[in-house]
Image (spheres, helix red, strand yellow):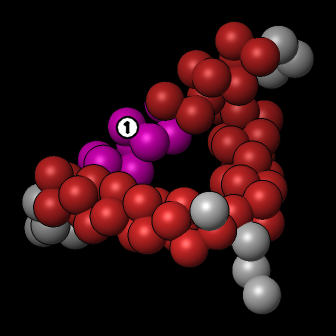
Amino acid sequence: MTTNADRAEWALTAVQGYADEHGPKGTPEDEECATSDLLCNMLHLVRAQGRDPKTVLDAAFACFTEEETEEA
């Protein structure tokens, strides 16, 4: 079974890869900045694909909430 810790590790891998390519790294602040920037750029991708970023964010948050509830 996939856990929220697994999901967080996958996301951390993505953030670290993004930071390695596009920004400074080495401090928690750098990781926080890379996370925000990656999320922002993902929304640009969503818009470029002709989708509504708010709809995607709402769906993602609903999924997050459901997964948090399942594991609680």
Q: Residue at x 30, y 49 (%)?
A: 43
Q: Which residues are magenta?
A: 37-44
Residue 29 vertical placement versus 33 (above, below): above
Residue 45 in the figure: left or right of residue 55? right
Q: Nearer the viewer, residue 64 or 41?
A: 64
Quadrant in which the C terminus appears: bottom right
- Residue assigned mark 1: 40
Q: From where the camera sits, is residue 1 visible?
A: yes
Q: Residue at x 16, y 52 (%)?
A: 54
Residue 38 lies in the magenta-colored region: yes
Q: Nearer the viewer, residue 16 or 12?
A: 12
* Crowding near the residue tagged with mark 1, few <14, some 14–19, many ≥20 C-alpha atoms within 10 Å: few
Q: Nearer the viewer, residue 11 or 42?
A: 11
Please, what is the three-letter code of the amino acid marked with disc 1? Cys
- Secondary structure mostly seen in magenta is helix
Q: Residue at x 40, y 51 (%)?
A: 42
Question: Quick one: which residue is furthest to the right in this view?
Answer: 26
Residue 59 vertical placement versus 53 (above, below): below
Q: Residue at x 62, y 23 (%)?
A: 32
- Residue 69 place in picture, x, y as percent: 50, 65
Residue 67 lies in the magenta-colored region: no
- Residue 1 place in picture, x, y as percent: 77, 87
